[in-house]
Amino acid sequence: MATMRLEIVTAERLVYSEEVSSVVAPGFDGELGILPHHAPLLTLLKPGELRIRKDGQETLMAVTGGFMEVFENKVVVLADAAERDSEIDLARAEEALKRAKERIVARGADLNLEHALSSMRRAEARLKVARRRRGTTAGPTRPG
Ligand code: ATP
């Protein structure tokens, strides 16, 4: 079966480097499916779920934004942060979501709305991936 190289890196670490058969990534304008020998591509990612297929098995990762480049049968994801489903601390993500929502709802004088919304989206991406792995569905979340 055809494969391609997938590397997921952050400023801190090499998160993943394997031969895989497909990748579905959270592109800025919607989900992007990449198969081996895809045309060259450079795109922005938003916080969300990255699904990897390798040897018939699916691996889920949360990414919090960054870039994805496809070139010469290699996919490189340069992520702000990335965690495998098994690495996600569910309680920490729940706390981060709660904090961000509280900041938004309180509308304090020092509120940086963009910053708070970004925190919320990062936490939601982590919760979606962690809960999917645990076989429960993440409900929709709205500030307030
Ligand atoms: P928090 O407020 O909980 O720190 P955050 O969204 O501000 O969350 P990031 O700045 O995106 O965190 O990530 C900082 C580091 O912490 C990264 O290395 C990231 O992989 C890790 N990280 C953040 N949240 C989690 C989590 N829930 N489970 C595992 N690792 C996490």
Image (cartoon, helix red, strand yellow):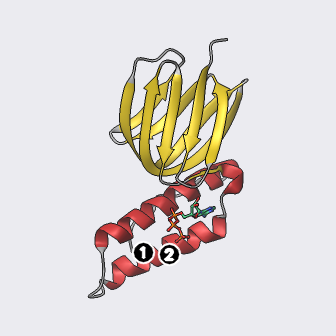
Residue 3, horizontal then vertical, whole percent: 62, 18
Badge 2 is on which residue? 98
Can you tell which quarter of the image residue 93 is in? Answer: bottom right
Q: CA distance from mark 2 to mark 1?
A: 5 Å
Q: What amino acid is at disc 2?
A: Lys
In this view, the residue in front, 138 or 40, is: 40
In this view, the residue in front, 102 or 116, is: 116
Numbered circle sitting on residue 116: none
Residue 5, horizontal then vertical, whole percent: 60, 25
In this rendering, the answer to whether 59 lies above or below 92 is above
Q: Quadrant of ligand 1?
A: bottom right
Tag 2 secondary structure: helix
Tag 1 secondary structure: helix
Tag 2: Cα neighbours inside 10 Å, few (<14), some, or many (≥20)?
A: some
Q: Is residue 75 visible?
A: yes
Residue 131, horizontal then vertical, whole percent: 64, 55
In this rendering, the answer to whether 79 lies above or below 101 is above
Residue at 49%, 25% in the rendered image: 34
In this rendering, the answer to whether 136 lies above or below 103 is above
Badge 1 is on which residue? 101
Query: Could you tell whether 77 is left or right of 19 in the image?
Result: left
The C terminus - image quarter: bottom left
Residue 42, horizontal then vertical, whole percent: 37, 32
**Number of marks in the rendered image:** 2
Q: Is residue 134 visible?
A: no
Q: Is mark 1 within 8 Å of ligand 1?
A: no
